[in-house]
């Protein structure tokens, strides 16, 4: 019996060696491209993002020869990693805060209080969507749409023009605002300092505002109304607005402040040091949620309705799946093989940084999707090319490129909801979108070259 067992074992090993030889004969970049296309097809077929990334992670392991025990260990290690757990909790708490303010009517009151602070209708037309954009929420553009429509009717703007205004200025913060899951995931994946990330990327909001303003001038709209000068009419007091803005201020100042404090406090503990900023943000979010619940006297039934929202579990699952994908990528020789292919074929890393996130963003229509699919690959390539000192520059370029893809994606929920509300078509809105998108993409490339030229930071 023993010889037979040995013979079977030899056959299996021979088949395995043959399979590995076949895989290695296929260029690594093509194997990764196959996995990448599989994830995109899964997303397009409306498979949940969590399932799509988990499927991609498994196929990534198969395509690069990881055996099941090693793959299982990599998946488990990624799931229980402190960064995974803390990031999943932060994203969930942000959604809880967002839903709580929505259910309590506090977001509506916030907009109402703000409306009296600025007399110019033209300026309100821009600021209302921007204010909504400070608090991430799926399809958030629909909240500012009624007010934009009301103001736009007085200015005789068309439906597609109003759609553009509501849509574009809703998304001017998403390049760096630390409450957005895509930004948090980028910082986690690339292991960047939050303050440095914000310092280098916040100018993109000014670029987005300026590019949108250029398009507004084409509509004949100016954000400053000479006929309605400040002080002509009585303004509302600012204190009620600040009170309604309190939860967001708690998250911003307490969250970032406590994160910095914990970083110094736990500097001698490797585990706590790695998630110190996340702990600060988690505590601030819990405090902010508690304030919203207490101030608005939400009932137990309403609180349970918020906490039992299925979207929370879906978001946790998606974050975990993305980090599992990254974990599998790190446990094989994929990046080294791909780097060799890119060097041999002379494909610039900058070109990949632009094209890869742009394609995923366009297909998926959500920021966290292109960050999760493209950035683990990009970050590993940046490290293997010895460009890690320019990580912020590459992440900036990748974020802008991917987000341009999201903005023009027909899958983007905000775009679909805005079109439906204002009764405009995608074609009409695209006529207004393409120029600001190209403007900010070109600026990001010039900014990348500037950051690269000035040296490591």
Image (cartoon, grey):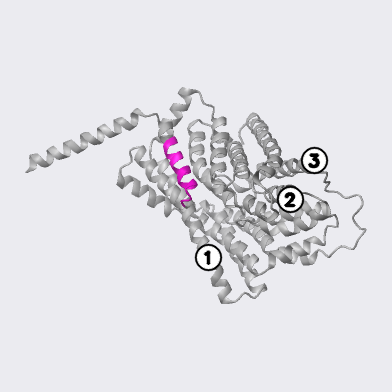
Q: Earlier in the sequence, mark 3 or mark 2?
A: 2
- Residue 5 sits in quarter: top left
Image spot of residue 102 (x, y percent): 64, 65
Residue 41: say if magenta.
Answer: yes
Comparing 51 with 354, the one in front is 51
* Rendered image: mark on residue 78: none
Q: Which residue is identified by label 2?
A: 159
Image spot of residue 400 (x, y percent): 62, 40
Q: Is residue 226 left or right of residue 35?
A: right
Q: Earlier in the sequence, mark 2 or mark 1?
A: 2
Q: Which residue is identified by label 3?
A: 218
- The CA span between labels 2 and 1 is 33 Å
Residue 134 in sight in this render = no
Q: Element type at marker 3?
A: helix
Task: Point out the stretch of residues depicted in magenta.
Answer: 33-47
Q: Residue at x 74, y 47 (%)?
A: 161
Comparing 456 with 292, the one in front is 292
Residue 251 in sight in this render = yes
């Amino acid at each position: 019996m023993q010889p037979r067992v040995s013979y079977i074992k030899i056959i299996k090993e021979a088949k395995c060696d043959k399979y590995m030889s076949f895989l290695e004969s296929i260029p690594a970049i093509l194997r990764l491209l196959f996995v990448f296309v599989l994830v995109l097809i899964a997303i397009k077929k409306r498979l949940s993002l969590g399932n799509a990334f988990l499927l991609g992670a498994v196929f990534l392991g198969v395509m690069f020869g990881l055996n099941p025990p090693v793959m299982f260990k990599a998946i488990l290690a990624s799931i229980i990693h402190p960064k995974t757990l803390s990031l999943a909790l932060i994203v969930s708490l942000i959604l809880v805060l967002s839903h709580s303010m929505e259910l309590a009517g506090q977001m509506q009151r916030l907009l109402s209080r703000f409306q009296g602070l600025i007399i110019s209708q033209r300026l309100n037309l821009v600021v209302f969507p921007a204010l909504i954009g400070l608090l991430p929420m799926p399809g958030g553009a629909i909240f500012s749409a009624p007010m934009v429509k009301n103001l736009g009717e007085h200015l005789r703007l068309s439906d597609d023009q109003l759609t553009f205004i509501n849509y574009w200025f809703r998304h001017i913060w998403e390049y760096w605002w630390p409450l957005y899951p895509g930004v948090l995931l980028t910082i986690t994946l690339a292991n960047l300092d939050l303050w440095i990330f914000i310092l280098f990327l916040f100018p993109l909001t000014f670029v987005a505002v300026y590019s949108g303003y250029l398009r507004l001038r084409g509509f004949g709209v100016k954000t400053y109304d000479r006929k309605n000068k400040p002080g002509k009419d009585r303004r509302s007091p600012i204190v009620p607005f600040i009170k309604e803005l309190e939860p967001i201020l708690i998250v911003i100042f307490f969250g970032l402040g406590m994160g910095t404090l914990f970083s110094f406090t736990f500097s001698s503990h490797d585990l706590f040091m790695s998630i110190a900023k996340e702990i600060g943000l988690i505590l601030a979010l819990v405090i902010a949620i508690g304030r919203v619940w207490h101030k608005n006297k939400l009932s137990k039934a309403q609180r349970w309705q918020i906490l039992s929202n299925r979207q929370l579990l879906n978001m946790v699952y998606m974050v975990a799946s993305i980090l599992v994908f990254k974990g599998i990528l790190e446990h094989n020789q994929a990046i080294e093989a791909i780097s060799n292919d890119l060097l041999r074929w002379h494909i610039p890393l900058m070109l990949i940084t632009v094209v890869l996130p742009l394609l995923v963003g366009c297909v998926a229509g959500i920021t966290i999707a292109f960050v999760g699919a493209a950035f683990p690959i990009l970050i590993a390539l940046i490290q293997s090319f010895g460009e890690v000192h320019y990580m912020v520059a590459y992440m900036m370029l990748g974020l802008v490129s991917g987000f341009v893809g999201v903005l023009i994606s027909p899958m983007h929920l905000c775009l679909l909801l805005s079109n439906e509300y204002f009764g405009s078509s995608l074609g009409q809105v695209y006529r207004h979108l393409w120029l600001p998108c190209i403007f900010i993409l070109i600026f990001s490339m010039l900014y990348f070259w500037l950051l690269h030229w000035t040296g490591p930071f």
